[in-house]
Amino acid sequence: MKKSIAVLLYCCIISLGVKAADDTWIRINQLGYTPTSVKVAVWVSKSNDKIERFELIDASNDKAVFKGKAGKPFGSYGPFLQSYRLNFSPFKEPGKYYILAGNVRSPVFTIDNDVYKGTADFTLRYMRQQRSGYNPFLKDSCHTTDGYTMYGPMPDSTRIDVAGGWHDASDYLQYATTSANATYHLLAAYRDFPGVFSDAHQANGLDGVNGTADVLDEARWGIEWLLKMHPRKDWLFNQLADDRDHRGMRLPSLDTTDYGVGPGKGRPVYFATGEPQGLGKYKNRATGVASTAGKFTAAFALAAKIYREKDAAFSGLLKEKALSAYSLGLQKPGVCQTAPNLAPYFYEEDNWVDDMELGAAALYELTSDRRYFNQAYRYGLKEKITPWMGADTARHYQWYPFHNFGHYELAAQAGSKSSKEMTGFYRDGIEKVWKKGRANAFYRGVPFIWCSNNLTTSFAIQCFLYEKLSGDKSFEELAQANFDWLFGCNPWGTSMVYGLPSGGDTPVDPHSAFTHLYKYPIDGGLVDGPVYGSIYKNLRGITLYNPDQYAGFQSDLVVYHDDHGDYSTNEPTMDGTASLVYLLAAKESGSGEVNALKKK
């Protein structure tokens, strides 16, 4: 997408702030801050200047309303030589403000209880737009002939109806592992924060009221596809389509990719065998089925509990599917990775006990059968900390999901002997990230791997859940810093969510056919996020098509580009957006206070 000079100028004003210096900026959360939350801006400079104080200025009259000390200098980070954290948390008066430090001022931002209002619903727009089968954004259908089986107990190319679900990202592959995780997050958001969500859409995603919260409509869209991917108690499918999809940008309704059976005549659906798969040059390293089966179990079991009073028959079916999926996980422990074909890239998931822990915990909540609690507890002891926490890098989706909801579900059981242990595991993981993050002004301890924004979102959720369980506010500022990062308090000064906030500096040229070819908005989509410069330099097929408006903020450490040619940092993902739905619902419900969580 070619930006006009006017748009570039606007982005510069929003991103850089109105300032007298050419080498210094103040980064803020563009969504704003609630009166009682931690409120921190980050001052960064390409010179080695130092500051001692800053002022919070009322934007309506340009008068100072708060004066604070800049605190300690954090030194260099990325492209900057000097940086400070400017903490104005004591100030609680609603209004519009900017920060002034020396000759540098920040963009205007809001302090108000309603700054997060409607944001969780906004991100659901992207989920609806990702629907396969009937797509309500396009008001058209796609991929209705899916699919034909591979690797299953039936003859290859056997036809089976697996149409539906969500496209994984800007490509049109569909993965059970990300879809099940996304479904669980949507269901948990509805369970924990029901008052946040509105009813403005029908079950098919079109405008209209149907008596059901939109987030539950979206979760059910995911559940219905998962049911197709687990059609019998001994059948489980893991993936629909493969990287033969990657043949240029087009709308899903115009997808005529030929998978060997004729253009548009269906895509392969991969049976979960527990063994390495790949129909072309490259293969994965699968060792089992449990990583996928555990995710299916958790989604089905939570859905069964939610629908118990709404639709008893549907709830009964979901319970049956949860039990059969869990049984498959017990039979074939190990990881069920996604299958590559033409390129060596796939979701390299290397852990699975976290998935079985959450599945067993969800079954315990559904059935009250103590056996499932005991099994979940044993699984929880096998992976106390999600392994990316504290690591400098990881392979793509190597440890997934990016936080372990199972620890929370076990710890939240009243009187549970495991509560203290599981809560402690959460703390230990947070401490590992904090050990790295405390050294820089952005409190950044999350590694810059592919989908770093997804990790950031999950880490903020883990901090939220930990505080809910423990009442310990030690990591409150760290959690807020990770949330702020997603909405502009980062080296580039940009939000990582398309269209949020309205009028802010947000992605305009993501790696998406919707935006690139047709100028359609992809409201609410969370883009992958920044990656290490070393990763970016070694990826295949990346070309920047427009001048980089963030060129001055790139570094050998980390890069981010708002350019459709950069699929590594600027492609939105369905599962990351679903996790963000949960995080924004948590922030919106009770203005982010931990007592907002309505548990079970």
Image (cartoon, rainbow, N blue to C red):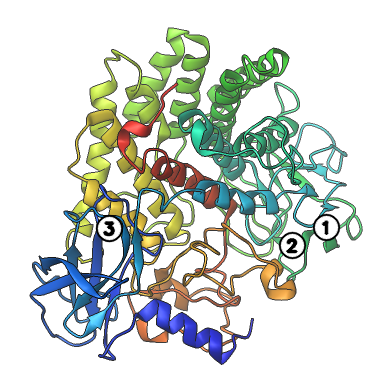
- Compared with 548, 378 (above or below) is above
Position in image of residue 94 (x %, y %):
30, 55
Query: What residue type is disc 1 on?
Result: Tyr
Q: Which residue is drawn at 60% across and 75% down?
A: 564
State if disc 2 and disc 3 touch (CB < 8 Å): no
Position in image of residue 104 (x %, y %):
24, 82
Residue pointed to by mark 2: 244
SS for dot 2: helix
From the viewer's perspective, is 345 left or right of 57? right
Query: What residue type is disc 2 on?
Result: Arg
Residue pointed to by mark 3: 445
Q: Nearer the viewer, residue 408 or 91?
A: 91
Label 1, label 2: how far apart the Cα atoms are? 7 Å
Give the label on residue 259, or none: 1
Q: Which of 588 and 460 is in front in this view?
A: 588
Label 3, label 2: how far apart the Cα atoms are? 35 Å
Label 1, label 3: how far apart the Cα atoms are? 42 Å
Q: Which residue is drawn at 42% across and 59% down?
A: 452
From the viewer's perspective, is 274 left or right of 79? right
Q: Can residue 391 be seen in this view?
A: no
Q: Earlier in the sequence, mark 1 or mark 3?
A: 1
From the viewer's perspective, is 278 left or right of 39? right
Q: Residue at x 46, y 78 (%)?
A: 537
Nearest to viewer (mark 3 / mark 2): 3
Q: Earlier in the sequence, mark 3 or mark 2?
A: 2
From the viewer's perspective, is 557 left or right of 344? left
